[in-house]
Structures are given as C-alpha cells and as structure tokens.
Amino acid sequence: MSELQEFAERMAALFTAAGFPRMAARVLMTLMLSTDAALTTDQLRERLGISSGAVSGAVKYLERLGMVRRRAHRGSRRELYELPEQAWYTSTLRQPPFYGEIAALLPDGLAIAEHAGATGPHERLAEMQDFFVFLRRRMPELYDEWRAQRADGPPASSTG
C-alpha cells in the first residue's frame, strides 16, 4: 500500500469514527488523493480491495451528498467517478435539501409534543428547529465567505 493510500485510510477512519459510512469514507479519501480526483469502479475496487457492489453503494451515498459525480470514461463504456470542484466544501456549506426537510418537519413534532404536554421533547425540538433555521440562513453566507477567502490568496494552512 502506498503512503498516500495509507494516509487515505487514516483519514477515512476519522470520518468513520465521526459517523460517516466506512466504504463511502474510503472511496472519498481515495478519490481525494488520486492524481486526477477521478477513478473507475475497477480502479477503486483494486485500490481498496472491495467489491463492485461496495463501490456502487459508496458512490451512491457520495452522489446524494454532492461529493462525487459520474461521467462517461472516454473511449470506454465504463463510468468515471470524480470529485466535483471543491466537492467537500460545496457539499458542506451549500444549503442541502436535508436542512429544509428537517425545518419543514419540525413544526409537526413541536405540535405533537405540545399537544402531548411533553415539555422536555418540545424544548429540545424547538432548539433543534432554531438551529436548522439558523443553518439554512447562514450556510449560503458561509459558502460565499469561503469562496471570497479562497479568491483572496493562499489558504490559511499555508501560513503556518
């Protein structure tokens, strides 16, 4: 195993420990550290020692998050899986539909908890609703700030 692949595995383990699906984390980090940020199913299978089905499931998960996209592999009927430009940041900071879905569902939970006289759940759901409303409002601004920072110069990590 190359040093880069060993590093990819260590990063994937951190993502997995934080709740990210293991195969999706391994595929994501392998793509992140590949030369072109794009690999075929066979290349991912070979590098990771996993089945085509495991690759497919991981890619489907990553596609839903906007972290991977499929495109035709030139001169072949195979698909190439690639990271969109700024995949991690874009999928994290854009306004995912998930936040809107949660915010839309929470009033139902609040009404049910209130009707049941469940003070504790009502307070926790109200806090959750406030948080997701905040995220929906701030995520586009954070993404714009990130893009502006990237346009202004070298990344902060290069300054030490």
Image (tube, helix red, strand yellow):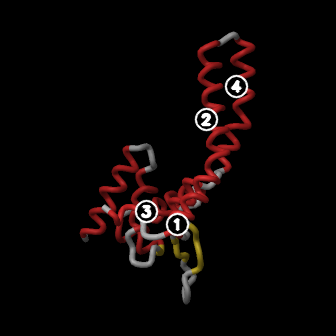
Nearest the viewer among 94 and 110 is 94
Mark 4 or 2, which is nearer the eye?
A: 2
Q: Secondary structure at mark 1?
A: loop
State the separation of the CA atoms marked 2 and 1.
25 Å
| Residue, disc 4 | 109
Quarter of the picture holding the N terminus: bottom left
State the separation of the CA atoms marked 1 and 4.
35 Å
| Residue, disc 2 | 131
State the separation of the CA atoms marked 2 and 3.
31 Å
Residue 159 location, quadrant: bottom left
Mark 1 or 4, which is nearer the eye?
A: 1
Asked whether the beta carbons under mark 1 and mark 3 sit within 8 Å of each other, the answer is: no
Q: Residue at x 69, y 18 (%)?
A: 113
Closer to the N terminus: mark 1 or mark 3? 3
Nearest the viewer among 90 and 106 is 90
| Residue, disc 1 | 86
Q: Position of 104 compared to 19: left or right?
A: right
Closer to the N terminus: mark 2 or mark 3? 3
Mark 1 or 3, which is nearer the eye?
A: 1
Q: Residue at x 62, y 19 (%)?
A: 123
Q: Amino acid at mark 4?
A: Gly
Residue 99 location, quadrant: top right
Closer to the N terminus: mark 4 or mark 3? 3
Closer to the N terminus: mark 1 or mark 4? 1
Q: Position of 105 compared to 68: left or right?
A: right
Closer to the N terminus: mark 4 or mark 2? 4
Q: Amino acid at mark 1?
A: Gln
Q: Residues within 10 Å of mark 4 (few under 14, many from 20)?
A: some
Which mark, residue 27?
3
Q: Position of 136 compared to 93: left or right?
A: right
